[in-house]
Image (tube, rainbow, N blue to C red):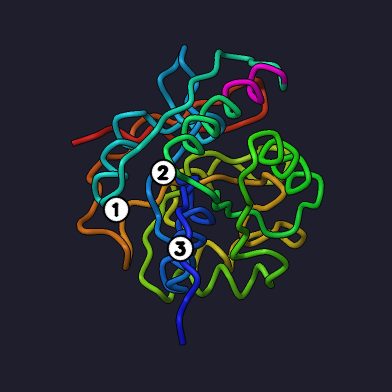
Amino acid sequence: MVNERKSGSGLERGKDSALALHETLESGRYEVRELLTTVTRDYDRISIHGVRSVLLEKQAKALGFPLEKTFISKGASDEEYENEVVKALRRQRDAGVSSEVFGDIFLEDIRKYREQMLAKVGVNGVFPLWKKDTQTLARRFISLGFKAVVTSVDSEVLVEDFVGREYDLGFLSDLPKGVDPCGENGEFHSFVYYGPIFRGRVSFTKGAKVLRDNRFYYCDLVPV
């Protein structure tokens, strides 16, 4: 059997992206060329996740892929975000990339939005986790040996104690009813620091916890 092979670019930062990257590599259908992540310029941190850019760089190095960072300003509008991402997609397309990999699972509007951006530059979207059961995906991530820490939580659905915790079976069992085990509705976000596709661990210590916008708790991860 001959597998279809296309150039691919992974969108990497949290656990769903890491699992999507793993599934893409396992399929043998794509050649992953680089990782793409949005960084808030004012904070020099991964947008929404709150992880320092230096840890993102260490993560990419541990995964063995080049990293492209797309910079947006604090409080960026949808228009600014889209313009910057489309610029990055065009650069990748011109370098021979034909597909972009995403870790989205079931939010139809998010997938539609991504596909509309991709259509502007003529590249395809690959969604390896799409419509799969999130409880199954969460347990697969853990059983594969991935290690992740929860970097932010929405205080409207989770208390402060959840931020900074390891994403493991204990975390899943403690989640309140109605909270998606993959945090697909934005209940929490994570940073992956080790796993089967890593060459080594990304080292850090857990720093201060802070509340931002009177809603989101963040746990700072400090490189070591």
Q: Decide if residue 119 is on the left or right side of residue 188.
A: right
Q: Point out which mark residue 35 bears.
A: 2
Q: Position of residue 211 (x, y in %)?
A: 56, 25
Q: Residue 22 falls in which quadrant of the image?
A: bottom left
Of callouts 1 and 3, which one flags the residue occurring earlier in the amino acid sequence? 3
Q: Residue 45 falls in which quadrant of the image?
A: top left
Q: Is residue 17 above or below residue 113?
A: below
Rate crowding at label 1 as few (under 14), some (14 to 19) or many (20 or more) other CA atoms within 10 Å: many
Q: Is residue 190 above or below residue 39?
A: below
Q: CA distance from mark 2 to mark 1?
A: 10 Å
Q: Where is mark 3, residue-wise?
A: 30
Give the farthest residue toward the bottom: 1
Looking at this view, is 1 or 142 the one in front?
A: 1
Q: Is residue 148 above or below residue 1?
A: above
Instruction: Give the mark toward the camera: 1 or 3.
Output: 3
Q: Where is mark 1, residue-wise?
A: 63
Do the CB atoms of the residues marked 2 and 1 lie less than 8 Å apart? yes
Looking at this view, is 181 or 199 the one in front?
A: 199
Instruction: Give the mark toward the camera: 2 or 1.
Output: 2
